[in-house]
Amino acid sequence: MARALELTSWLGVSISHPGEWELAIASGPDEPGRCTFTDRHYHRLNIQWRKVKQPPKLELLLEKYRQSDKGQLRELSPLGNLPAGWVGLLRKAAEEGVVTYATKVFTLCEPLLLAEVTLVWPKEQQRDAALEAAILKSVAAESSAWPRLWQAMGLSLDLPRPFDLRRNDSKVGRVSWEFAAPGHTIPPFVVQRLALPEYWIKGSLMDWMKKQVPAGHKAVKEEAAVVNGHPAWRLISRGRADLWSSLRGRRLLRLDLAWLCPQESRVYHLITHRTSRTEEPALPEGLVIRCCRPVPQVRPGKVRKA
Amino acid sequence: MKWRGQKQLQPQPSAANLLAAVPYRNRAMEITFRPDGSALVSIPIPRPKFLVPPLSWILPFSPHRRVELEPVGAGVLRMCDGRRTVEAIIEEFAADHKLSFREAQLSVAQFLRQLTQRGLIAVVGGGKDDRG
């Protein structure tokens, strides 16, 4: 039976994986691309990617991997029946289980992208070649199409041109991504997704949002809105801009937009700024944030009540 | 060669062992669960030996330390009944709050560590040998 896979799209690379393998490590915007997924006990899937000028010889990469593993008493064998473009090796070790290493150059994107995928099959579990092939087949590099999909850590959005991730400040149960456009003409914006709203939000959502506004800001406008069919709140606050802008009579205006998705039990919070005299800040056109997505179903593990 | 005072490195328990461990509540503590879901925990603390008259006349001493838990934390403490494993607590917590296993695991593990440091619970076992 084919397993339902979940899509993760991060920094321009997307990969599908079983839902119970969760993203544990995600690289930052200025780092070589990397995503590591874990199950309850082990790192199960690691994908690394980097831009290359010339397509490297994959056989040489495999040989390098083979050499690095030399003398460790493991059985290495070439991996067959892989999706188009992938080459790989299978590493077997009696105590550790099986590790699959596969690599591919994506030539349809500019610049070229070299992706390396490592899959871990612990000794308690049988290697699932069909799942392995499905995961490798799902790996895709970014195309030039806009808007671009960002989907990871439970958050899913379509990002319009020319924004890109500037900062990932995510913590457990509090995903926070900041997107910015090159240059300083278009203001950046932040998207946050918070778990456990009953813990964070004691009063109303508007009261909570007012507390999020930095000191020195004064709320100037509060209004109700509807986002994805949910009641939402918009708050415009005004703060002091930098000296040059202040001399020209401009103020720093901040927009906060928040709503609670009851199906996910998450609060979505969007923030953007604008330095202006009267014009209100606005979120970029074409930005789509999806909520009401399926809630992760935690299935009981092997160890139950003692 | 081992230096004097050097700590011997202990083998780190695996993730599977940690999940199979069972948290037990401190039997000496008193818990009052409130109607709003929060809890007030009172843990007896031993009187320090130096706290004798006349020092004890000046320094106030409370024989109990009180810890107030929010409804979310009180729910986790309620699940620490000596029967549920850490994994079972994480599963229940994740299901109750619509979290993924990893989100619940990191939150619950951190909270259980705090409860252990404050003497509210003790986490026992987890290794295959310990489970018998």
Image (spheres, coloured by chain):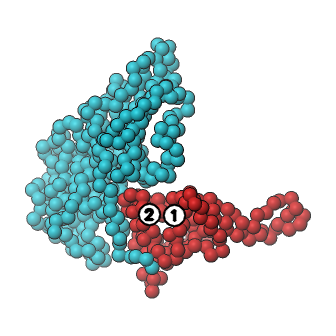
- Left/right placement of residue B39 relative to residue A294 reads right
Chain A: drawing colour: cyan
Tags 2 and 1 touching, CB below 8 Å:
yes
Q: Is residue A115 visible?
A: yes
- Tag 2 residue: B93
Q: Is residue A152 visible?
A: no
Q: Residue furthest right?
A: B54
Chain B: drawing colour: red
Q: Quadrant of residue B87?
A: bottom left
Residue B75 tag number: 1
Residue in view at x 49 percent, y 77 percent:
B83
Q: Is residue A16 positioned above or below A151 on the image?
A: below
Q: Is residue A99 positioned above or below A145 on the image?
A: below
Q: Chain of mark 1?
A: B
Residue A82, percent from left and from top: 12, 62
Amino acid type at circle 2 is Phe
| Front residue of this view, candidates A147 and A163 | A147
Q: Quadrant of residue A277?
A: top left
Q: Quadrant of residue A287?
A: top left
